[in-house]
Amino acid sequence: MSARRKLLGLLGGLAVSGLLRPAAALTADRPAPAGWLDGEQSDRFRAWLSFIVADQLQRGPSPRWFHRDCAGLARFAVAETLRSHDARWRRANGLAGRRLPPELDLAPVQRSLLNGWTTLDGERQNFVTAQALIQKNSRLLGRESAMAKPGDLLFFDQGDDQHLMIWMGSWIAYHTGQPPPAAPPAAPAGGAGQGRASPSTPQDNGLRAVTPAQLLQWKDTRWRPRDDNPNFAGFFRLAFLSR
């Protein structure tokens, strides 16, 4: 059995067993479990995460973003969203004076429980793979985009590799997972532009933005978020969001 079929079979089994439950909004008689974000916090979380992801595409990757790949984009955006966005953070990120979303106002217990990710082995770490983000830190929504909200994840299984994209509502963000190409050689000593990359060959930072319509018609059918695509596992929601 291929690795892809094994993983999709595991995801299906988890959904049936209830470990990957369809996401549903919590009601007044179903309070959020300890550490979860309540409804208003979840909405604010989405606003912040959308802002941070869009900022990476508009201004380029933050120097604080390490492990630049598809899962790394999600981990970085979540970590920055959960930070306290005080004056020091705003200055450090060049956002002083910018209009920003309202703060999440996390309780101490929430900050504690949201510190880190659950690995495939059940440990808590700052680094997890795309597979662990889905299997251990998210819950299944289904394969219909109508169920997704900004900040939800699209998960693709390509055999030995898995890939994440971030649903932004009217568009989709992702990182290709490829390192930037090496800069071209510097000009000879004394030449113009010595020690600098040629402006005609800007580096590719790996970030991409596409519309749902574009992705649905993608030439490589493995990346189409369609129900008839066996490589598309579906839309997923981070487990700590209550809606």
Image (cartoon, rainbow, N blue to C red):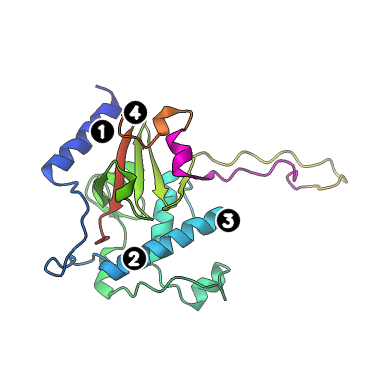
Magenta: main secondary structure? loop
Q: Residues within 10 Å of mark 2 (few under 14, many from 20)?
A: some
Q: Nearer the viewer, mark 2 or mark 4?
A: 2
Q: Nearer the viewer, mark 1 or mark 3?
A: 3
Residue 43 - label: 2
Quarter of the view holding residue 92? bottom right
- Residue annotated with mark 4: 159
The three-letter amino acid code for the residue at tag 2 is Asp
- Magenta highlight on residue 204: yes
> Residue 65 placed where, x, y %?
49, 55
- Magenta highlight on residue 24: no
Instruction: Say if 101 sits above or below 229 in the image.
Output: below
- Residue annotated with mark 3: 58
- Residue annotated with mark 1: 7
Q: Name which of mark 4 and mark 3 comes first in the sequence.
A: 3
The three-letter amino acid code for the residue at tag 4 is Gly
* Residue found 21% across the figure and 60% down from its top: 25
Image quadrant occupied by the C terminus? bottom left
* Residue found 57% across the figure and 76% down from its top: 97
Q: Secondary structure at mark 3?
A: helix
| Span highlighted in magenta in the image | 195-217
Real-space Cα separation, disc 3 to disc 2, in angstroms: 23 Å
Q: Nearer the viewer, mark 4 or mark 3?
A: 3
Does the image show residue 45? yes
Q: Secondary structure at mark 4?
A: loop
Q: Is residue 136 left or right of residue 232?
A: left
Q: Residue furthest right?
A: 190
Q: Name which of mark 2 and mark 4 comes first in the sequence.
A: 2
